[in-house]
Amino acid sequence: MERIAVILQARLGSHRLPGKVLARIGTRTLLEHSLIRLAASGLPLIVATTDRQEDDAIEREAVRLGAKVFRGDSDNVLARFIAAGHEHQLTTIIRACGDNPFLDADGPARALALFGRVAADHVIECGLPSGTAVEIVTLAALERAQQLITDPYDREHVTSFIKRDSRFRALRVVAPGDVRRPGLRLTMDTQEDLDFVRAVLAQTGAGTRVPRLGEVIKAAEVLRVRAAAAAAAAAQNLTRQGA
């Protein structure tokens, strides 16, 4: 029998933006934003964090939010996912990353619908804003990859080997047009990213309501237009001053 769950990887030890998973965006932590959106799938939610003491805080927040927690290797994220899959007796995993506050709530359902119609090891949608997509992969494929991988990069990035190696059937499908914005960045790696996603959320006017991805995209595009206009005005002023 097929057993499917969402596994969200998260840790506090980011080099560029330490502690970002628990940073507040509006009234919620980043982790809470991610889990609320993933909960729309109706699937069990598992937060896969590390066994480092600093990530005790992630475990507490995940438990508060009603998610299950698995703790494992801090560097070999692939091994962490496989171990979490075994612990929860999964056959298939929907993978998400904990630095993405605007994950597409409808993404898991679309991925599962396609996955149910085709024979594939891995499925991911392309064309969504950076930081909003999830991917679906079988536990068996992860285990096969673990045996074949030689580069530590692929252990850290979980599905990178599966997506590029011809021994796996990995499908890339085009996202729906209304949320297809491949040039838009909505992930969080730096303080600048954090400032931007906070501004985007405020621009939606959602308050405590969780805005759909389409609303988020519109808000982000408004902010980008404003920023471009401000930059153009500043450049024009400098030109006038130099004249």
Image (cartoon, rainbow, N blue to C red):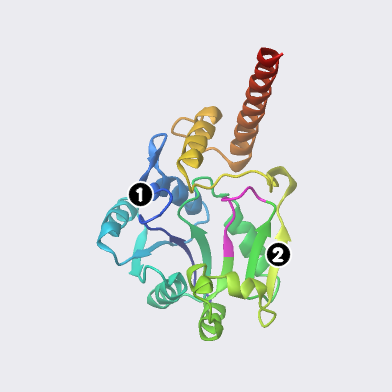
Tag of residue 19: 1
Q: Is residue 140 left or right of residue 89?
A: right
Which of 167/105 is in front?
167
Q: Position of residue 146 (x, y in %)?
A: 51, 81
Q: Is 59 left, or right, of 147 in this rendering?
A: left
> Label 2: which residue?
172
Which residue occupies 68% across, 45% down? 183
Task: State whether residue 168 appears in this view.
Answer: yes
Task: Report the span colored magenta.
Answer: 128-135
Whether residue 1 can be seen here: no
Tell me, for residue 107, which label it has, or none. Answer: none
Task: Provide the secondary structure element on which disc 2 rests.
Answer: strand
Q: In x, y percent, where is residue 38?
A: 49, 53
Image quadrant containing the C terminus: top right
**What is the three-letter code of the residue carrying label 1?**
Gly
Which residue is depicted at the point 36% across and 56% down?
13
Tell me how many marks there are.
2
User: Which structural element holds mark 1?
Assistant: loop
Residue in the picture at 28% in, 64% down: 52
Majority secondary structure of magenta residues: loop
As shown in the figure, which amino acid type bears the numbered disc 2?
A: Arg
- Does residue 129 show up magenta in the picture? yes
Q: Is residue 94 left or right of residue 52?
A: right
Image coords of residue 87 (percent x, y): 37, 76
Q: CA distance from mark 2 to mark 1?
A: 32 Å
Tell whether position 138 is magenta. Answer: no
